[in-house]
Amino acid sequence: MNHPTDFNPGLTRAVGLGTDAMPTSLYTDAAQFGLERKQIFRRAWLMVGRVERIPNPGDFFVKDLAVVDASIIVARAADGKVRAFHNVCAHRANIVEHRASGNAKRFVCRYHSWSYDNAGALANVPDEAGFFGLDRKKCGLTPVALEIWEGWIFINVAPEPEVTLREFLGPVADALAGIEYQNPDHPIVLRGEFKANWKAVAENFSEAYHVASIHPKTLAPFYTGPSNPFGRPISVRLHGPHRSMSWWLNPLAQPFADSKVAKWLFSADHSVTGTRKAGQTNSVVEHKHVNPTKDANWASDVNWFFPNWHLQISANQFWTHEFWPTSASTTVWEARFYYKKAATVRDRLQLEHFTSQITDSMLEDLGNIESMQVGMASGAKPVVHFNESEVLCRHSLEQVVKWSNAATMRDALA
């Protein structure tokens, strides 16, 4: 058995990161948040959803992004192409579409009934003759740059993006290409509002150092153990501004040891939640860049795409986290867990049980993250310190500082 401190020592230096403490002001300062809005969120490519969310012509969803003062329509037009637009009418700049999602041949502004087709072109103007030199071609919905990678939809709100999505993703695009995403059309969606900085919220989902303390009954039995009591990662990979980590799984864990109901639910060979019993040999496990060391005690990979999206992959399922800042000290968190559709009552109960487990762990995190923000705002501690288990958190802050001071995206990506 390894001595606890011998599990993957020296990881921070091994991946080329510094070891200094980092300023607490990065989580609290209003001027810093202003820089992040301008230098990061208004320049970077942002993941907003999967193509399966809008499979049919006319399907759309609206993404409200307070961090860039924008409401975005993402729609599949009649020609089958996926496009994005600012959700703003050309008449007097009112919001056009107030539904969160749906199917529409026309987007109609309810103020004066100006309408647009699902490719963004102006379709109808009541009393058009009463306007003066109205140029219909210039009065469509304002387009937003959109590109798709591996079924994931990214947008860029800059009028002219400085780099393509492929350039922005860099080596992570190749590393994670070709992964088979199972059940991408069936997510369980969770949403929460945290009174905490977006980086602090994202960091919480990027390290297992806190698991033994905050989640002693829910998560600790799985992600910590005698040989790795502090949840250090198996391996870490840095991809420019992006980062990946392989999470360790305790081989001695006994799932649901104290729950007769859970034992009954998950005793079947078939599981819609993708437990280990479903098997570890498939195309995902065999992918070169998933658990690249092929460690037998592997739980999942956390892939943190800069700035605010997590793609987490395990042997039999995948899930995502989005962290959308609404101010320097508030964040909207959205998570999507992708599972098979329930075909039986037992399947449905499995999903409900698993969702309740996730919710329990999120509630455990919520109070902790918000109290940390209160402590940071006090100014009592000018710096924060990162452990070897928190290497992704350190890399995130280093990249935030770099981007906040970069004159161009190419400088930030260099």
Image: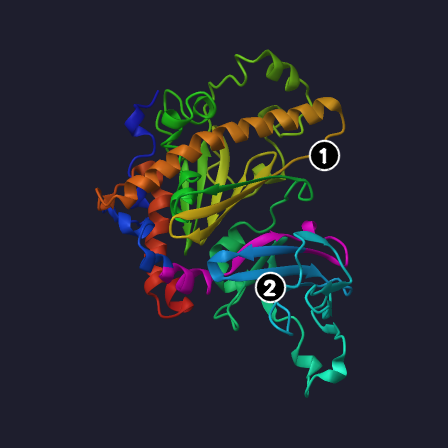
Could you tell me residue 199's position as x and y percent?
39, 48
Location of the C terminus by quadrant is: bottom left
Residue depicted at 70% across the width and 80% down the height? 136
Given residues 217 and 272, the one toward you in this image is 217
Residue furthest to the bottom: 133
Give the extent of the magenta segment.
34-60
**Which residue carries the number 1 mark?**
341
Could you tell me residue 300's position as x and y percent?
51, 35
- Magenta span includes 51: yes
**Which residue carries the number 2 mark?**
146
Q: Amino acid at mark 2?
A: Leu
- For residue 400, above or below residue 265: below
Residue depicted at 40% across the width and 64% down the height? 39
Secondary structure type for disc 1: loop
Q: Is residue 329 left or right of residue 189?
A: left
Q: How many callouts does the rendering have?
A: 2
Q: CA distance from mark 1 to mark 2?
A: 29 Å
Secondary structure type for disc 2: strand
Is there any visible trace of residue 272 in the rendered image?
yes
Q: Residues within 10 Å of mark 1 (few under 14, many from 20)?
A: some
Q: Earlier in the sequence, mark 1 or mark 2?
A: 2
Q: Which image quadrant is residue 413 in?
A: bottom left
Q: Which image quadrant is residue 318 in?
A: top right
Residue depicted at 63% across the width and 20% down the height? 266
Q: Residues within 10 Å of mark 2 (few under 14, many from 20)?
A: many
- For residue 153, above or below residue 291: below
Q: Amino acid at mark 1?
A: Lys
Location of the N terminus by quadrant is: top left
- For residue 357, above or below residue 66: above
